[in-house]
Image: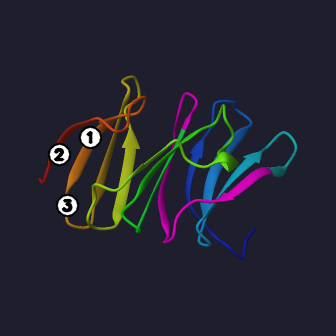
Amino acid sequence: MTQSGICAASQLNTPESFAFAGLNNEVYLFSLFSGTVIQSFYAHDDQITAVMNKNQWLITCGLDSIIKVWDLNLGCSQGPTHTLYEHEEGILAADVHPSQDMMVTIDSDFQVMVREIENPDTLLCQFSP
Protein backbone atom coordinates (compact mmCIF):
# COMPACT_ATOMS: atom_id res chain seq x y z
CA MET A 1 0.00 0.00 0.00
CA THR A 2 2.78 2.44 0.71
CA GLN A 3 3.95 2.31 -2.92
CA SER A 4 0.79 3.97 -4.18
CA GLY A 5 0.59 6.61 -1.44
CA ILE A 6 -2.57 8.03 0.05
CA CYS A 7 -3.83 11.29 -1.38
CA ALA A 8 -7.49 11.44 -0.23
CA ALA A 9 -9.67 9.66 2.31
CA SER A 10 -13.27 9.55 3.49
CA GLN A 11 -15.10 7.53 6.12
CA LEU A 12 -17.81 5.22 4.75
CA ASN A 13 -21.15 4.37 6.33
CA THR A 14 -19.74 2.00 8.94
CA PRO A 15 -17.33 3.18 11.62
CA GLU A 16 -14.83 0.47 10.73
CA SER A 17 -14.63 1.24 6.99
CA PHE A 18 -13.23 4.04 4.87
CA ALA A 19 -12.20 4.80 1.31
CA PHE A 20 -8.92 6.28 0.14
CA ALA A 21 -7.28 7.00 -3.19
CA GLY A 22 -3.81 6.01 -4.21
CA LEU A 23 -1.46 7.91 -6.49
CA ASN A 24 -2.09 5.09 -8.98
CA ASN A 25 -5.61 6.53 -9.60
CA GLU A 26 -7.32 3.66 -7.81
CA VAL A 27 -9.79 3.86 -4.93
CA TYR A 28 -9.50 1.38 -2.07
CA LEU A 29 -12.29 0.42 0.33
CA PHE A 30 -10.62 -0.62 3.58
CA SER A 31 -12.01 -2.41 6.63
CA LEU A 32 -10.41 -1.68 9.99
CA PHE A 33 -12.30 -4.69 11.37
CA SER A 34 -10.46 -7.14 9.12
CA GLY A 35 -7.41 -4.95 8.45
CA THR A 36 -7.69 -5.51 4.72
CA VAL A 37 -8.69 -3.82 1.49
CA ILE A 38 -12.14 -5.20 0.72
CA GLN A 39 -12.35 -3.72 -2.75
CA SER A 40 -10.24 -1.63 -5.09
CA PHE A 41 -11.02 -0.19 -8.49
CA TYR A 42 -9.54 2.14 -11.09
CA ALA A 43 -11.38 5.47 -10.84
CA HIS A 44 -9.67 8.30 -12.79
CA ASP A 45 -7.15 8.90 -15.57
CA ASP A 46 -5.24 11.47 -13.50
CA GLN A 47 -4.56 11.98 -9.78
CA ILE A 48 -7.61 11.71 -7.53
CA THR A 49 -7.93 14.86 -5.43
CA ALA A 50 -11.07 14.11 -3.40
CA VAL A 51 -12.92 11.08 -2.06
CA MET A 52 -16.19 11.82 -0.28
CA ASN A 53 -19.00 9.72 1.12
CA LYS A 54 -22.64 10.60 1.82
CA ASN A 55 -25.17 7.88 2.60
CA GLN A 56 -24.77 5.19 -0.08
CA TRP A 57 -22.83 7.49 -2.43
CA LEU A 58 -19.08 7.59 -2.93
CA ILE A 59 -17.90 10.63 -4.88
CA THR A 60 -14.47 10.96 -6.46
CA CYS A 61 -12.89 13.95 -8.23
CA GLY A 62 -9.59 14.32 -9.99
CA LEU A 63 -7.13 16.36 -11.94
CA ASP A 64 -8.72 14.81 -15.05
CA SER A 65 -11.55 17.39 -14.48
CA ILE A 66 -14.09 14.62 -13.87
CA ILE A 67 -16.54 13.98 -11.01
CA LYS A 68 -17.68 10.38 -10.58
CA VAL A 69 -20.53 9.22 -8.34
CA TRP A 70 -20.50 5.57 -7.27
CA ASP A 71 -23.42 3.75 -5.63
CA LEU A 72 -21.99 1.69 -2.76
CA ASN A 73 -25.16 -0.44 -2.73
CA LEU A 74 -24.48 -1.58 -6.31
CA GLY A 75 -20.76 -2.12 -5.81
CA CYS A 76 -18.14 0.22 -7.16
CA SER A 77 -16.65 -2.37 -9.50
CA GLN A 78 -19.81 -1.98 -11.62
CA GLY A 79 -18.60 1.51 -12.54
CA PRO A 80 -19.88 4.96 -11.59
CA THR A 81 -23.59 5.71 -11.79
CA HIS A 82 -22.77 9.27 -12.93
CA THR A 83 -19.74 10.75 -14.69
CA LEU A 84 -19.72 14.54 -14.88
CA TYR A 85 -17.54 16.56 -17.26
CA GLU A 86 -18.57 20.21 -16.60
CA HIS A 87 -15.22 21.31 -15.18
CA GLU A 88 -12.74 22.47 -17.80
CA GLU A 89 -9.73 22.35 -15.47
CA GLY A 90 -8.50 19.83 -12.91
CA ILE A 91 -10.61 19.62 -9.76
CA LEU A 92 -8.52 20.70 -6.77
CA ALA A 93 -10.97 20.20 -3.89
CA ALA A 94 -14.49 19.07 -3.08
CA ASP A 95 -16.78 18.59 -0.10
CA VAL A 96 -20.27 17.40 0.81
CA HIS A 97 -22.71 19.37 2.94
CA PRO A 98 -23.09 17.79 6.41
CA SER A 99 -26.90 17.80 6.42
CA GLN A 100 -28.12 18.72 2.92
CA ASP A 101 -28.03 16.67 -0.29
CA MET A 102 -25.31 18.84 -1.85
CA MET A 103 -21.69 18.68 -2.90
CA VAL A 104 -19.32 21.41 -4.06
CA THR A 105 -16.26 21.22 -6.29
CA ILE A 106 -13.64 23.80 -7.29
CA ASP A 107 -11.16 23.56 -10.14
CA SER A 108 -7.80 25.17 -10.84
CA ASP A 109 -9.55 27.98 -12.78
CA PHE A 110 -11.53 28.77 -9.57
CA GLN A 111 -14.85 27.61 -11.03
CA VAL A 112 -17.10 26.46 -8.18
CA MET A 113 -19.97 24.07 -8.89
CA VAL A 114 -22.69 23.04 -6.46
CA ARG A 115 -24.91 20.09 -7.27
CA GLU A 116 -27.27 17.57 -5.69
CA ILE A 117 -25.78 14.25 -4.68
CA GLU A 118 -28.92 12.17 -5.28
CA ASN A 119 -29.30 13.75 -8.72
CA PRO A 120 -25.77 14.91 -9.63
CA ASP A 121 -26.74 15.82 -13.20
CA THR A 122 -28.56 18.80 -11.65
CA LEU A 123 -26.19 21.76 -11.33
CA LEU A 124 -27.61 23.99 -8.58
CA CYS A 125 -25.21 26.87 -9.17
CA GLN A 126 -21.87 27.76 -10.67
CA PHE A 127 -19.69 30.76 -9.88
CA SER A 128 -16.16 32.03 -9.70
CA PRO A 129 -15.14 33.78 -6.44
Ranked by sequence position, the earlier of labels 2 and 1 is 1
Ranked by sequence position, the earlier of labels 3 and 2 is 3
> Magenta span covers which residues?
38-57
Q: Specify whether residue 101 is painted magenta.
A: no
Q: Amino acid at mark 1?
A: Val
Q: Amino acid at mark 2?
A: Gln
Q: Specify whether residue 40 is painted magenta.
A: yes
Residue 88 sits above or below residue 51 on the image? below
The residue lying furthest to the top in this view is 99
Determine whether label 3 and label 1 are within 8 Å by CB: no
Q: Amino acid at mark 3?
A: Phe
Left or right side of 25 for 50 = left
Q: Where the N terminus falls, by quadrant?
A: bottom right
Left or right side of 77 for 118 = left
For the residue pair 68 and 102, the one nearer the viewer reads as 68
Determine whether label 2 and label 1 are within 8 Å by CB: yes
Point 34% across, 56% down: residue:
85
Q: Which residue has dot 2 on it?
A: 126
Point 41% across, 68% down: residue:
64
Q: Nearer the viewer, mark 3 or mark 2?
A: 2
Q: Which residue has dot 3 on it?
A: 110
x, y (%) of residue 118? Answer: 43, 28
Residue 45 sits above or below residue 110 on the image? below
- How far, Cα to Cα, is label 2 from label 1? 6 Å
Point 38% across, 26% down: residue:
101
**SS state under label 2:** strand
**SS state under label 1:** strand
x, y (%) of residue 27? Answer: 63, 57
Point 48% across, 72% down: residue:
46
- How far, Cα to Cα, is label 3 from label 2? 10 Å
x, y (%) of residue 50? Answer: 47, 55
Q: Which residue has dot 1 on it?
A: 114
